[in-house]
Amino acid sequence: MKRCNRCGCFFIGTEEVCANCIPNDNNDKAKLSDYCSTNTVLSFEDMIDKTGVSPANLSRYLSMNEFLQYSKKVKKENDIGF
């Protein structure tokens, strides 16, 4: 049994999020990918403001392999780590 990284409910599966959260997670990833691919200077705060992705989910996404290329470009205020 796992705990959903998005809503916190318990579920059985191999994903990081429960079945109810998968569509929202995919939508947030798409918004983030679009934002990152069209902006050369990336700011953690701007990414939150422009995409609507929560700070917790943004940190989680930036640690994923599919976003590693962008996570290296992110400038964070006060060098806050994720």
Image: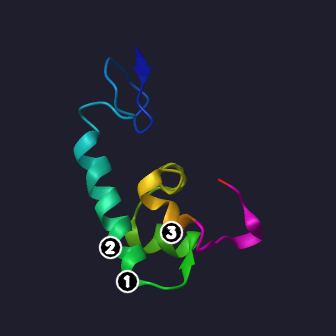
* Left or right of residue 29: residue 44: right
Query: Residue lying furthest right in this view?
Result: 78
Q: Which residue is mark 2?
A: 34
Q: Which residue is mark 1?
A: 38
In the image, is residue 81 above or below residue 4? below
The residue range painted magenta reads: 72-81
* Left or right of residue 47: residue 51: left
User: Looking at the image, is mark 2 or mark 3 earlier in the sequence?
Assistant: 2
Q: Is there a contact, CB below 8 Å, between mark 2 and mark 3?
A: no
Three-letter amino acid code at disc 2? Answer: Asp
Residue at the location (26% across, 41% down)? 22
Nearest the eye: 40 or 18: 40
Q: Is there a contact, CB below 8 Å, between mark 1 and mark 3?
A: no
* Left or right of residue 29: residue 71: right
In the image, is residue 48 above or below residue 42? above
Q: Is there a contact, CB below 8 Å, between mark 2 and mark 1?
A: yes
In the image, is residue 78 above or below residue 62? below
Three-letter amino acid code at disc 1? Answer: Thr
Q: Which residue is mark 3?
A: 70
Residue at the location (44% across, 29% down)? 8
Decide: few, some or many residues near mark 2? Use Cα within 10 Å; few <14, some 14-19, many ≥20: few
Three-letter amino acid code at disc 3? Answer: Tyr
**Helix, strand or loop under label 2:** helix
Nearest the eye: 21 or 37: 37
Nearest the eye: 29 or 70: 70
